[in-house]
């Protein structure tokens, strides 16, 4: 499942009489952790194709 | 968080602020659940005092806590590192395996390897969901020194394991590439420099001959394959060249690389250990360069060890690597089989006899090893339980790796990892990318396939 979750960032403040407040950003995705990974020495690709 | 059940009464979740070096945003984190939010720096005090973001997090805190507990304490092994030989044709300066083994150690016979895989298959069948296949990675020393046994094993157990091979690349000839790619084996190579002079400083034969061009030739053979990667071990010898390194990888269409800080488990590696500041500067310059290359040409070069930090923040259970979590994956998500048939929590421990958990084919086998004192000493390393990690707000994005290094270099299992400041900077950098809406640029396409959104707050 792919979803767009990141809120639009605001890295520059608008020049207005009352300064704009950057919107909060908080994201947490979750999945079944079984078989999630190995160590730094080997990366096993999820999809193997030639 | 303890290894006991996360259920029960928890105090109102506490958020702690963190300056991430961003012009607009600061981070608020609950280290116990790995929850984070980015808020306008001018509103940190207001947000900590209460309001909609805190109220919303309060609703999700228990779910975050349960998820992190399951990841840290409830996994069963789903992978094994197979060392089919003790020998290597190279003598790299930072290797974690003892020189005596690499120079003149033994091979596993074909029969020994097949018997080992049979035992491993039966074990994984007993603990994994039906239809699940464990991962088996042939690993170093140099597994292709025992090529016939490795290839026989891959063919004999093709339906039982998802296979990988980590190799120095020097023996990866046309025949080997044809065999491995026809069977969808994931392949990892190692190269430490953009030119022979840099690579040769740390990776060379026993007679100090260069292997740089042989690895480049192997990379050429793998071009276009869907599942390969290259590791660069970052040392004092190649830090100034990491940007050139990623340029080389991108030009040669390497899909994924890792820029791993050298593991300092054995003393020889410590001679080429960079300090955290130098490591950070070179690493982030290389990351910035990968983004420029992506922006200019539309093709990503994913730096997997950094991508893993990003994913640990965005989706803790979707991690691809299990070093940056505490307890780490050693002895609980995976374990290692040495060429003499003994089991270790991770290959990193194979040169350290006190961490031997027992023989695979002995009575008790894998189950006995997993509950041995040797394994329990590694599995029991918990950043919640020792200082200063227990007070660190990013401890579950970092994990204070690696236990082998901490034990051998820093004095014990309750010592911090070797690159503490470098990890803090990686987390800050990752959070800045999220603030700037660039995180996906540093991740594999489809990295979040199979995930669900637990939290998506915007206020």
Image (cartoon, coloured by chain):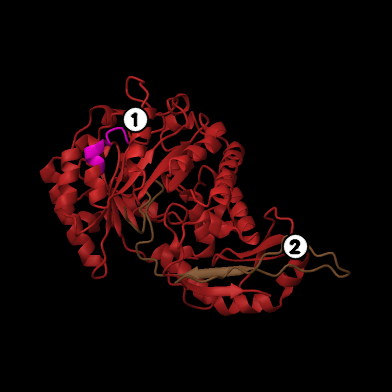
The residue at the point 36 percent across, 20 percent down is B208
**Image height of B261 relative to B114, above or below:** above
Q: Quick check: B334 left or right of B265?
A: left
Please, which residue is most extreme toward the top here?
B207
Label 2 marks a residue whose chain is B
x, y percentage for residue B16?
A: 66, 64
Color used for chain A? brown
Q: Secondary structure at mark 2?
A: helix
Q: Name the residue carrying label 2.
A: B41
* Figure colour of chain B: red
Left or right? Give the position of B93 relative to B356.
Answer: right
- Residue in the foreground of this view, choosing between B359 and B192: B192
Which picture quadrant has residue B14?
A: bottom right
Question: Picture quarter containing residue B264?
Answer: top left
Q: Position of residue A31 (x, y in %)?
A: 43, 70
**Residue under pointer 1:** B214
Q: Secondary structure at mark 1?
A: helix
Q: Residue furthest left?
A: B111
Q: Residue under mark 1: which chain is it in?
A: B
* Picture quarter with the C terminus of chain B: bottom right
Q: Residue furthest right?
A: A17
Is B440 or B208 nearer to us in this picture? B440
Residue appearing at x 17%, y 55% in the figure: B157
Query: Which x, y percent locates residue B108?
Result: 17, 40
Which residues make up the magenta segment? B169-177
Q: Position of residue B127 (x, y in %)?
A: 25, 66
């Amino acid at each position: 499942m792919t979803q767009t979750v990141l809120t639009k960032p605001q890295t520059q403040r608008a020049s207005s009489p009352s300064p704009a407040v950057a919107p909060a950003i908080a994201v947490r995705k979750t999945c079944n952790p079984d078989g999630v990974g190995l160590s730094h020495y080997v990366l096993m690709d999820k999809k193997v194709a030639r | 968080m303890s290894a006991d059940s996360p259920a029960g009464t928890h105090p109102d979740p506490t958020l702690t602020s963190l300056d991430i070096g961003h012009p607009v945003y600061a981070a608020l984190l609950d280290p116990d659940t790995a929850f984070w939010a980015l808020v306008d720096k001018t509103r940190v005090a207001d947000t900590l005092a209460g309001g909609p973001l805190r109220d919303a997090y309060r609703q999700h805190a228990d779910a975050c806590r349960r998820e992190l507990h399951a990841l840290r304490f409830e996994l069963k092994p789903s992978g094994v590192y197979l060392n089919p030989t003790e020998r290597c044709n190279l003598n790299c300066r930072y290797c974690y395996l003892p020189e005596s083994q690499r120079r003149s150690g033994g091979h596993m016979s074909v029969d020994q390897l097949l018997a080992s895989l049979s035992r491993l298959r039966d074990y994984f069948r007993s603990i994994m969901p039906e239809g699940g296949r464990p991962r088996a990675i042939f690993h170093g020393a140099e597994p292709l020194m025992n090529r016939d046994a490795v290839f026989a094993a891959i063919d004999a157990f093709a339906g039982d394991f998802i296979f990988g091979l980590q190799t120095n690349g020097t023996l990866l000839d046309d025949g080997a590439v044809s065999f491995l790619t026809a069977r969808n084996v994931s392949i990892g190579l190692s190269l430490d420099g953009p030119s022979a002079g840099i690579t040769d400083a740390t990776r060379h034969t026993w007679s100090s001959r260069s292997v740089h061009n042989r690895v480049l030739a192997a990379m050429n053979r793998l071009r276009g394959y869907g599942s390969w990667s290259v590791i660069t071990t970052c040392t004092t010898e190649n830090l100034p060249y990491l940007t050139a390194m990623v340029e080389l990888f991108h030009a040669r269409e390497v899909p994924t690389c890792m820029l791993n800080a050298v593991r300092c488990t054995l003393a020889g590696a410590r001679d080429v250990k960079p300090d955290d500041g130098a490591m950070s500067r070179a690493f982030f310059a290389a990351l910035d360069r990968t983004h420029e290359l992506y922006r200019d040409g539309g093709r990503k070069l994913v730096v997997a060890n950094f991508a893993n930090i990003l994913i640990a923040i965005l989706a803790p259970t979707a991690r691809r690597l299990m070093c940056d979590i505490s307890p780490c994956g050693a002895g609980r998500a995976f374990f290692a089989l040495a060429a003499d048939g003994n089991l270790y929590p991770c290959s990193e421990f194979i040169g350290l006899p006190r961490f031997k958990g027992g023989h695979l084919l002995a009575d008790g086998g894998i189950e006995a090893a997993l509950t041995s004192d040797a394994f329990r000493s590694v599995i029991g390393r918990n950043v919640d339980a020792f200082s200063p990690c227990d007070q660190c707000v990013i401890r579950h994005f970092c994990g204070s790796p690696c236990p082998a290094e901490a034990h051998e270099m820093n004095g014990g299992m309750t010592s911090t990892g070797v690159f503490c400041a470098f990890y803090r900077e990686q987390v800050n950098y990752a959070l800045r990318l999220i603030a700037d809406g660039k995180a996906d640029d540093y991740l594999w396409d489809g990295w979040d396939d199979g995930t669900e959104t637990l939290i998506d707050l915007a206020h």
